């Protein structure tokens, strides 16, 4: 079963508008972390934001915020005031704290959402 | 700050050739990982290591081998390259028992098998 699901292959948003990128996850581990990465056309993985499963408040980092709904197992990324430079592929990822009794820290990735920001 | 360094950045291989992707980190991290990213897809775990001398398979290990003789280095070996191994490869590392954003990625290695 997919641990991370991103149902939007592509999204379009006009510059200066807000956009929400969807992510749902599947885990039975009570302790986990959720990540969003940006991958521009140059290919590097750029960390954007992190949410721990026990964090009470939604994470925010500048124009990025994570809408964490634990009961629904969703961790949507909200980008406010989109910029042309935000055009990229965005990946949601999850890190389970325990795997077969060890803290391995590996990430499970979704398939990504290609965001295009137009003027 | 070097972080995680991967070499080579680009490589073209012929079917049946072998090669090693090098990965080194200077942060004294226990955990290291190799991921591959196929076009239009997310990253999938090939192999990982929790410390020197310890390695284990991830989701897609077939056709690859790894070793971890030192904390710093985690090379990925491709034996008998196949077109299905055309991908972008990312090495990553993190400290043991970490939480939060403590996963560091290399810049990626683009491999084409023809």
Image: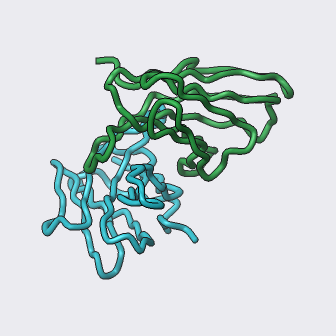
Chain colours: A cyan, B green
Whether B55 is drawn above or below A76: the answer is: above
> Given the current orientation, which residue lies at the most extreme right position?
B16
Q: Can you see residue A85? A: no
A94 and B41: which is toward the camera: A94
For the image shown, how many numbered marks are present on the structure?
Answer: 0
**Residue B9 percent across, percent down from the top left:** 56, 20
Residue at the image position 58 percent from the left and 42 percent from the top: B47
Residue at the image position 53 percent from the left and 41 percent from the top: B48
Query: Quadrant of residue A52 in the image?
Result: bottom left
Q: Is residue A33 left or right of residue B51?
A: left
B70 and A52: which is toward the camera: B70
Query: Quadrant of residue A79 in the image?
Result: bottom left
Q: Is residue A84 left or right of residue B80?
A: left
Whether B20 is drawn above or below B93: the answer is: above
Q: Can you see residue B24? A: yes
Q: Is residue A101 left or right of residue B110?
A: left
Residue at the image position 22 percent from the left and 53 percent from the top: A64
**Residue A92 percent across, percent down from the top left:** 41, 57
> Given the current orientation, which residue lies at the most extreme bottom position?
A71
Query: Quadrant of residue A70 in the image?
Result: bottom left
Whether B42 is drawn above or below B69: the answer is: below
Quadrant for the N terminus of chain A in the image: bottom right
**Residue B55 percent across, percent down from the top left:** 56, 39
**Residue A83 percent across, percent down from the top left:** 28, 45
Residue at the image position 65 percent from the left and 37 percent from the top: B87
């Amino acid at each position: 079963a997919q641990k991370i699901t991103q149902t939007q292959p592509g999204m379009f948003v006009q510059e200066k508008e807000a956009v929400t990128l969807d992510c749902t996850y599947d885990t039975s581990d009570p302790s986990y972390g959720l990540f969003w990465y940006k991958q521009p056309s140059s290919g590097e993985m750029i960390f954007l934001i992190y949410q721990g499963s026990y964090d009470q408040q939604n994470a925010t980092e500048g124009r990025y915020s994570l809408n964490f709904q634990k009961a629904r197992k969703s961790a949507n990324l909200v980008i406010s005031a989109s910029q042309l430079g935000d055009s990229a592929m965005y990946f949601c990822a999850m890190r389970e704290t325990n795997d077969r009794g060890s803290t391995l820290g590996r990430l499970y990735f979704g398939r990504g959402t290609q965001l295009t920001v137009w003027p | 700050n070097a972080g995680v360094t991967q070499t080579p950045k680009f490589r073209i291989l012929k079917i049946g050739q072998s090669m090693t992707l090098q990965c080194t980190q200077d942060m004294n991290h226990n955990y290291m990982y190799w991921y591959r990213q196929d076009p239009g897809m997310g990253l999938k775990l090939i192999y990982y290591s929790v410390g020197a001398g310890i390695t284990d398979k991830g989701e897609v290990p077939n056709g690859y081998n790894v070793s971890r003789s030192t904390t710093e280095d985690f090379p990925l070996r491709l034996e008998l390259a196949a077109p299905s191994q055309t991908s972008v490869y990312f090495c990553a590392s993190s400290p043991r028992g970490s939480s939060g954003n403590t996963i560091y990625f290399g810049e990626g290695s683009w491999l084409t098998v023809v």
